[in-house]
Amino acid sequence: MQRITNQRTRAQGLEPMGSIPTTETITQKLERTRAEVRRAITDVQAVEGRFLDYETADALQRTLSTAARNLEELTITLAVMESSQTLNNLLGKILRINSDGTIPTDNPFYATAAGRNRAIWALGLRVPFTFAIQSDTGRMFINDVGGHLWEEINEGVAGANYGWDESEGATTNPGQQSPFFAYENGTGDTRGCAITGGAFYNPQTAQFPAEYVGNYFFADYCSGWIRRIDPASGNAAIPFASGASNPVDLKVGPDGSLYYLERNIGTIHKIKFTN
Ligand SMILES: [Ca+2]
């Protein structure tokens, strides 16, 4: 019975959300609320199969549902705070800073964001795993790993909003920018699970034939293929290589070879053109 008494005390003593001390950080709140849920579940499990009086059963149920509701509210608060759509954090953004660490005053949100958030150059990305800048045109492509629908190559534009977490893949929202190219999640030669490496083929010495110069190579982590696009003439994707084991990065060397990094077996491969 001692245990039941303790449970009642907890049920009555559980703080409503509004009374959480403001000195507690959001992470501490989350940890505490999670602990409350875990404790409530343990208490319920401890009396499983036993006959309980109404008052005791009611107190247990209230404790559990209050803890679960607190956790849900806090999770939503946290998700909003961490959104890629807000200028109040650096998450899901492309940042632009000077070589000395200062923030360029012509950044698109310099006047509207505060503090270090003035470094935000573009927003609305989910997991911008890698990005590349074409040396001769200055064109930027951002590889954004999607949730469970689309993998995106986004054209870098100052002030752009790429949609996450309000959209994935192409969007009709006039305030948001659709991908330059996107492919669906799935298996096979044209689908995958995560766009990882991407590189423009603009080496000092082109080792590949002329038709490859200016191409953008990109790789998928699960499907292990590398495809290419000639961005100067549209966004058609052309098969290039297959069988890479969890590729995570692509680079073009000054010698004109294409290199890719495999995470699964920890190797770097070099691709050269041969007749
Ligand atoms: Ca997007």
Image (cartoon, helix red, strand yellow):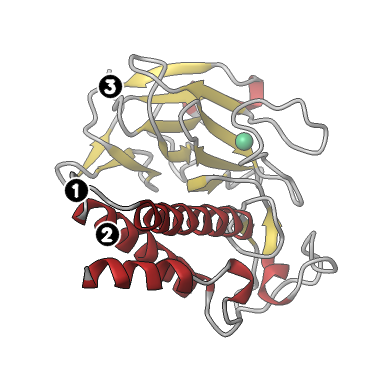
82 or 114: nearer the eye?
82
Residue 119 position, x and y percent, is 68, 67
> Residue furthest toward the bottom?
23
Q: Disc 1 vs disc 2: which is toward the camera?
A: 1
Instruction: Please give the label number shown on residue 242.
Output: 3
Determine whether the residue tagged by mark 2 lies in a helix, strand or loop: helix
Residue drawn 76% across the image and 51% down it: 159
Disc 1 to disc 2, how far (Cα)? 12 Å
255 or 67: nearer the eye?
67
- Looking at the rendered structure, the kind of residue marked 3 is Ser
- Looking at the rendered structure, the kind of residue marked 1 is Arg
Mark closer to the chain start, 2 or 3: 2
Q: Residues within 10 Å of mark 1 (few under 14, many from 20)?
A: few
Residue drawn 31% across the image and 59% down it: 38
Q: Is residue 70 above or below residue 123?
A: below
195 or 33: nearer the eye?
33
Q: Which residue is mark 1?
A: 50
Disc 2 to disc 3, how far (Cα)? 53 Å
Ligand 1 within 8 Å, label 1 CB: no
